[in-house]
Image (tube, coloured by chain):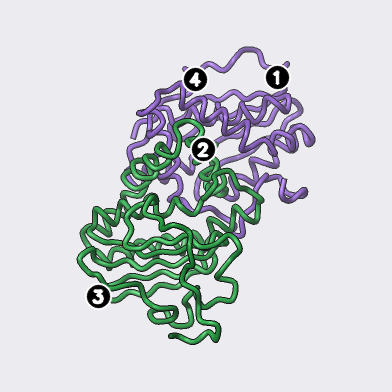
Amino acid sequence: MTDPQSPLPYRDTKPVGAADFYFAINATFRFLLERFGLDALRRYWTDLGTQYYAPLSIAWKERDLPGIAAYWRAFFAAEPGGQVEVHERDQEVVVAVAVCPALEHLRTDQREIVPCFCQHCYYVSEAIAAPAGFTVRVSGGGGSCRQTFMRREQAAAPQDLNEIREVTC
Amino acid sequence: MLGVYDFCGHYDWTFEWLRRTGGEALVRTYWEQAIAQDSQRHAAALIVPQGIAGMRAYWDHTLDHEAAGYHCVATDTVYRIDMFACPSQGFLVSNGLHHYHDYCDHCMGWVGPLMRTAGFVIDHEHNHAGRCWWEIRPAADTTPPSQPGGLAGEHDVRLLSDWLQPGGLDIYQRANGPDDKQPAAAGSVPPANGETP
């Protein structure tokens, strides 16, 4: 963590990121999907969560569920657009995405969105959460979803990928 | 969710993931296909039909949104950018991130092929410390790059006292891709007295 007081693992000088970078995220997914297939794309997402976001796993382990809630509040405050509420409860943190900032921007610019775009939220977050002793379940997708973070031992069943909708443009 | 607030961090990490997966060739293919042709199609839509006017429209929007420290000069025959505070490299440095061996090459990796398509060539240098300059001219124009201060005046990054860094400059002349980099040598050293030669 560059700033031990911040819930974000990395910090920028500008308060909100540049929305056009969502174009590159979507294009990166398409490049890997078309060239290497879905398994490789999922491996990229998992590696990203495990390696690039390793400092976040450490923070979540140290700060427990309040740290997870604080991260997502700070994260969405630094994303351009979107409508998101983060609910912190005794045994879980629920990230309720009413309007996904990424899909909103991609649609506004009439970009072709990879159908499995929303799966990255599960794979990246799970790779961050697992080393910290947590897991995530994602339901919905395509512009609005619900992401629930809980302790691994409290998860009733594995993530059902059918619960994550494919994106239609 | 992958965000854009720390995009430059996972972008840099992705270059190294690609290099480990498929070598430098895959990184270059990614810059050209995923970034130049897909992600940045809005840049191509402006620059290919409009040339220098399209460059102004694209970079005025993009560099403002990225909160860059920069200065641009446009004439009928050349478009020049002096970047004195690159927000992208600045993010990596301030967060202690350094996954890929030369993050700065990604700009030539996508801008170069786009300019080839649009009929332009690029003179460019970067110092790996958040500063660089670009001069983009029609491919048929053989005018050499300007001397320090000659086009951008006092905004020319080559006039800054810390332009030359221990790591050296990466130099491109009439380039259209990251592999057009010149062998490491003397760069465009600013005159000792700071005056325009």
Of labels 2 and 1, earlier in sequence is: 2
Which residue lies under the disc numbered 2? A98
Which residue lies under the disc numbered 4? A163
Let me know if marks 2 and 1 both belong to one chain. Answer: yes
Q: What is the secondary structure assignment of the residue under circle 4? A: helix
Q: Chain letter of disc 2?
A: A
Query: Within the image, what quadrant is residue B94 found in?
Result: bottom right
x, y percentage for residue B164? 56, 69
Q: Chain letter of disc 1?
A: A
Q: What is the secondary structure assignment of the residue under circle 2? A: strand
Task: Tell me how far mark 3 sits from mark 1, CA to CA.
Answer: 62 Å
Image quadrant where one finds the C terminus of chain A: top left
What colour do you see for chain B? green
Q: Which of the two marks, 1 or 4, is nearer to us in this view? A: 1
Q: What is the secondary structure assignment of the residue under circle 1? A: helix
Q: Amino acid at mark 4?
A: Glu
Residue A152: give its label: 1
Q: Is residue B31 above or below residue B121?
A: above
Let me know if marks 4 and 2 both belong to one chain. Answer: yes
Q: Amino acid at mark 1?
A: Arg
Q: Is residue B26 above or below residue B86?
A: above
Q: Which of the two marks, 2 or 3, is nearer to us in this view? A: 3
Task: Tell me how far mark 1 sits from mark 4, CA to CA.
Answer: 19 Å
